[in-house]
């Protein structure tokens, strides 16, 4: 996820949520050249899960994490 910002991840999640809404109301959605229909709902829901995890990861990585302290 090098270079990916929290804002970019949130924007992508919003796209997937909009796509899910369109599919659930029997519509079609386009991602670039690809048109997705109701039959692709599991793929959209997988994308929602992926972007949710990325947002959670980016939200947690804001500070310094100490994994081990070695006394000298």
Image (cartoon, rainbow, N blue to C red):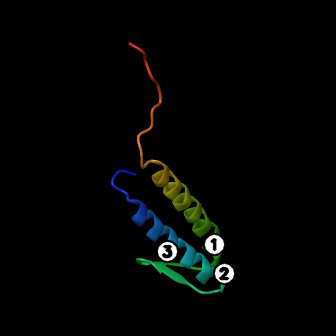
Camera-side residue: 3 or 32?
Answer: 3
Residue beneath the point at 66% across and 81% down? 24
Cα distance between the residues tagged 2 and 3: 14 Å
Can you say whether 13 is above or below 72 in the image? below
Check whether the beta carbons of the residues at disc 1 and disc 3 lie within 8 A of each other.
no
- Which mark is nearer the camera, 1 or 3? 3
Residue 7 pos. (x, y %): 41, 65
Residue lying furthest left: 3
Camera-side residue: 27 or 65?
Answer: 65
Badge 1 crowding class, 10 Å Cα cut-off, few under 14, some 14 to 19, many 20 or more, is some
Check whether the beta carbons of the residues at disc 2 and disc 1 lie within 8 A of each other.
yes
Q: Which residue is mark 3?
A: 15
Label of residue 24 in the image? 2
Q: Which residue is mark 1?
A: 41
Say which quadrant the C terminus sits in. top left
The mark total stands at 3
Element carrying mark 3: helix
Among the two numbered marks 2 and 1 on one chain, the one whose residue lies closer to the N terminus: 2
């Amino acid at each position: 996820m090098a270079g990916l910002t929290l804002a970019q991840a949130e924007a992508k999640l919003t796209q997937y949520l909009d796509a899910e809404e369109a599919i659930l109301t029997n519509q079609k959605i386009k991602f670039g050249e690809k048109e997705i229909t109701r039959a692709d709902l599991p793929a959209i829901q997988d994308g929602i899960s992926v972007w949710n995890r990325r947002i959670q990861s980016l939200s947690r990585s804001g500070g310094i994490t100490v994994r081990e302290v070695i006394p000298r």
